[in-house]
Image (spheres, grey):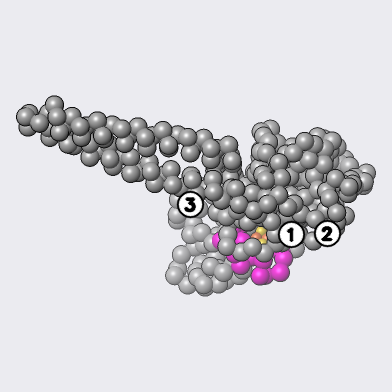
Amino acid sequence: MTTDTVPPYRPDISSLLAQPHDPWLGAHELSEYTFCDRAGLNTTHLEAADHGQDDNHVPPLDYQPEYDPDAIQRYLHVYSVRVVSWGMACMVMTLLRATTFQNNGLTWLMALLSSAGFLILGISDAGQLLFWYRQYWRSRMGDATLPDPVNPEPEAIHWWHFHRAGFVSASTVGGLQDDELHLAGQPFKLLQRGNEYVPVFLKRGDSTRLFPQHFVRIAVYCLLLQRQTNGIARYGLVLNAGTFDCVAIKFNRESFDLLSLNLIDARRTARHYRELDQSPPPPKPYLCRKCPFGKPLSVDTAESLIQREQTGLVPRANIGSDGRRYHAHCGDRFHWMPPHQQVVELGIPH
Ligand code: SF4
């Protein structure tokens, strides 16, 4: 079935309309609440002035030209011109050496060094030219097959299929936000074809496994896009960093229900914490094992000092088996020591 014959999913959002006291939540923040309520609160309080922005540690994809056909063409042109220029300069110097400078030792030597320099620059740029040619060749591979609009399951798909199907990069400057839902977000990259949009989330790490937070995040982007542009957003892409492999997560009843449940839960958790000073219970211990908020820091280190300045929290430190005092961001906020893998390895009581 073709995409055009299947109507997009347009959910009823009346039960999600925000009350004035409901906090604004960004897509990144909400996905942290989905992972763990305490992680959501840690994120909210750490990045209070940064609603709607995704992970700040990730460089914008706009600066990764190997994902952009126009940028690839641009680089191909630039490096072609440079290789030809260096090659011609090298040839001119070689000719001058063999003719005009033949009887002048010093000038001949300088011409020789110049030729060598031009040659080295030419070889270095030829390497770049080959790299961009390879990217160009890869961008021409594959066909224009898009995810099946009636299949509700996530589908693996190659990045370049979207470009082959006519999608181009659109600007995400300013991000997306919805005053009625108090929701915001800025996808890492946005693809557009007419009134059809595909938000992209860049996933770090080796694992290709999808978690509920990925579904919530993509659902937020699609919902915001549909409401803000009045266009169509059938799915979003989770792009594995350093590759061109994507998974298309569908925006459908299932992902929207997950978004709704988590949004309502996150609002309640944030309100209870803010108004009643009520902390959510700790999650299952395995979640803390690799969580950055649970990573122990020795109170003597500059890293710890910076973290404490950022959070304004008093460290809740325990002594490890090496005699040093350790604390963790999550522990400082919720007065405990999370069972992080390093907490166990360092013999810190928890
Ligand atoms: S350390 Fe544990 S409780 Fe704290 S944010 Fe991480 S997963 Fe949640």
Of the residues shown, which amino acid type is indicated by label 1? Glu
Whether label 2 touches label 3, CB < 8 Å: no
Which residue is nearer to you in this view: 190 or 305?
190
The span from disc 1 to disc 3 (Cα, nearest Å) is 41 Å
Dot 2 beta carbon under 8 Å from ligand 1: no
The span from disc 2 to disc 1 (Cα, nearest Å) is 9 Å
Is 182 contained in the magenta span? no
The residue wearing badge 2 is: 151
* For residue 164, above or below residue 86: below
Is 288 contained in the magenta span? yes
Say left or right for 90 vs 59. Answer: left
The residue wearing badge 1 is: 155
At x 83%, y 48%, the residue is: 3
Which residue is nearer to you in this view: 315 or 221?
221
Q: Counting other residues with Cα less than 10 Å from the Cα at mark 1, is it few (<14), some (14-19), or many (20 or more)?
A: some
* For residue 191, above or below residue 302: above
Mark linked to residue 303: 3
* For residue 51, above or below residue 108: below
The span from disc 2 to disc 3 (Cα, nearest Å) is 47 Å
At x 67%, y 34%, the residue is: 171
Whether label 2 touches label 1, CB < 8 Å: yes
Residue range in magenta is: 282-295
Q: Secondary structure at mark 2?
A: loop
Say left or right for 283 vs 344. Answer: right
Mark linked to residue 193: none
Can you tell which of label 1 and label 3 is closer to the viewer? Answer: 1
For ligand 1, the image quadrant comes to: bottom right
